[in-house]
Image: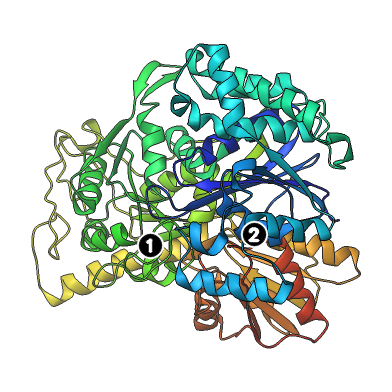
Amino acid sequence: MVIESINWMAGGPQGSGVDTASTIFGRACGYGGLYVFGRREYHSNIKTMHSYFHQRVSKQPTLANISDVDLLAAFDAETVVRHIGEVVSEGGIIVDSSDLNVNVLKEIQTFSEDYKNQIRAYMKENNIGEAVSDFLNYAKKKNIQVFPVPYMDLLKQIGEALKIEKVSMLSRMINVLTIGVSFALFKYDRKLVETAIKATFHEKIADMNVTAVDYAYDYAEKNLNINNFKHKLETLDADEPRIFLTGNQAVAMGKVLGGCRVQTYYPITPAADESEYLESHEILKTRKGDEAIIVIQTEDEIAAINSASGACLAGARAATSTSGPGFSLMAEGIAWAGNSEVPVVITLYQRGGPSTGQPTRHSQQDLRFAMHAGHGEFARIILASGDIKECFYDAAEVFNLAEKYQMPVIHLLDKAMANCSQTYPVFDYANIKIDRGEIVTEKELEGKEYKRFRFTETGVSPRAFLGTKNAVQWCTGDEHNESGNINEEPIIRRLMMEKRIKKLDLVDKEVPLEMKVNFFGDKDSENIVVSWGSPKGAIIEALNQLKDEGFSLGFIQVRMIHPLPSAYLKQMLEGKKRIIDIEDNITAQLGGIITQYTSIKPNFYILKYTGRPMMTTEVYQAIKAILTDKAPERQVLMLGV
């Protein structure tokens, strides 16, 4: 089934309000009963460089973005040039009238020389002149409508209405003007847009922005031929309450629900948004009354992981949140937690590397790093979410895994999930339970010698919180005996190493299969896709479309990557004609891990490592090429600017 949608994109300089405009847009659509999937892309430069937000709106849930743009709302000339090729026939472009005469090659200062060379080739190939108007005239030949809007004139009128003489004080409201024009073109209820604005800004600022959006609506209705624009957003009656949120927010809420009461972090993109969201909601309303989650911004990531481990030892459910370079700094602290069997949770948002790499771009490059970070060998669990809903539930569940099996748990996410936004029915949390594992109390220890690292059949030892009476214990980074005292005897070393590692067998045995993998499509198909993380949505939509065309496919989404459910994967993959590995990295890391543990090697790879997430459009095309025997063993996807 191909999901019908309307695709809106806003773009402009970093810091110009693109994100705010998109938040308003998504909320307004949600208030009208529509489903939204949003994708945020931004440059690592704090201001001036190009950023954009793509919103896909539908009457039914969508799972990923596609490459088409039906309406492009350009805050500046650069947005027109960068995205004009994505606007489809019968689509539209909203442009500032003052940008029409901008010389693309000489006046847009943020274009790199490499990109200018691409533009020159594009202009030569399509016989386009150097002005923005020339690009727009080319778009008109492709049956794309152009809607010039005199933003500064509108701001002057708004300033007069609000009794604000300096138009410069209103310049940031251009983003809201584009919202008003966009929804006027879509013939959408302006009252819903006003409601979304009031939900986004505090009262005084909200009133100013409502005035601005009304001026933009009125201008579009009077001066733009909106009836010729074929796309229309129609409201629906939603039969359930819904929520519109980002991946960062979903993780934060899941942590709170899972009992997290200490979160440590050092600011890093794209992880910091999660901790900042928690900081703004530190006082929690619960059945017990007001409770608090303590959020600590530490001096660096070394302090962040060790502070979280300390909180765990004291009995709190604690986590730290970071991205690639920060995770590198945490490696020794994670190894300490592994050696001391500390149930600390590390939320790892992958971004482009190596080193600083692409600090605000997407990747799935850290899978093997997460498996092996920290010197020596020790047990850890890695759980990878594939969409915002999974982010929410997994963020709660990882604390149960950490405490039940007494080991670090890495909740593995990526930039695409962190910064995408989506509409969902309000999550059902009634069945979420907290399992703190084998905790011993003061009373249970009366008259007994407490051994924190006692050898047991499963490897899991009774755990007492620091400060518990009758529970004297030592915590050290060195190898130790059952009491925690430093010990280097060969037999103790062997038994302790085996104690810690064999807990992975217990995890593999006890954790339900539905937490480890998801399967979609035809289990008996000779064609199986394997993947993990954020490509999930694009793959499912592509499979549905291919099913409508008569192709048979199955899709295994691997969620627990360590310990890997190798027996299940071997059973499902043996004898398949086409095993297609889809990942956002260059070395097909999951495919290599599957081969390592099952001896079964994928025979086709669909990979992307440009820093942009996968879209349904390109995944569909790549899989179809494989199924029709028109593809090489390895395809590299390139959509997105």
Q: Indicate the quadrant containing the N terminus: top left, top right, bottom left or bottom right.
A: bottom right
- From the image, state whether disc 1 or disc 2 is nearer to you: 2
Tell me the SS state at disc 2. Answer: helix
Q: Nearer the viewer, residue 358 or 464?
A: 358
Q: Compared with residue 464, is residue 613 higher up or lower down, i.e. above or below?
A: below
Whether residue 40 can be seen here: no
Determine the residue positioned at 57% across, 43% down: 75
Which quarter of the picture shows residue 544? bottom right
Circle 1 is placed at which residue position? 503
Which disc is residue 536 wearing? 2
Gap between marks 1 and 2 measured at Cα: 29 Å
Q: Nearer the viewer, residue 398 or 387?
A: 387
Whether residue 139 can be seen here: yes
User: Could you tell me residue 67's position as x and y percent?
Assistant: 70, 59
Q: Amino acid at mark 1?
A: Lys
User: Could you tell me residue 107's position as x and y percent?
Assistant: 49, 57
User: Could you tell me residue 387's position as x and y percent?
Assistant: 60, 50
Q: Amino acid at mark 2?
A: Lys
Determine the residue positioned at 48% across, 47% down: 13
User: Could you tell me residue 313's position as x and y percent?
Assistant: 22, 43
Tell me the SS state at disc 1. Answer: helix
Determine the residue positioned at 58% across, 12% down: 161
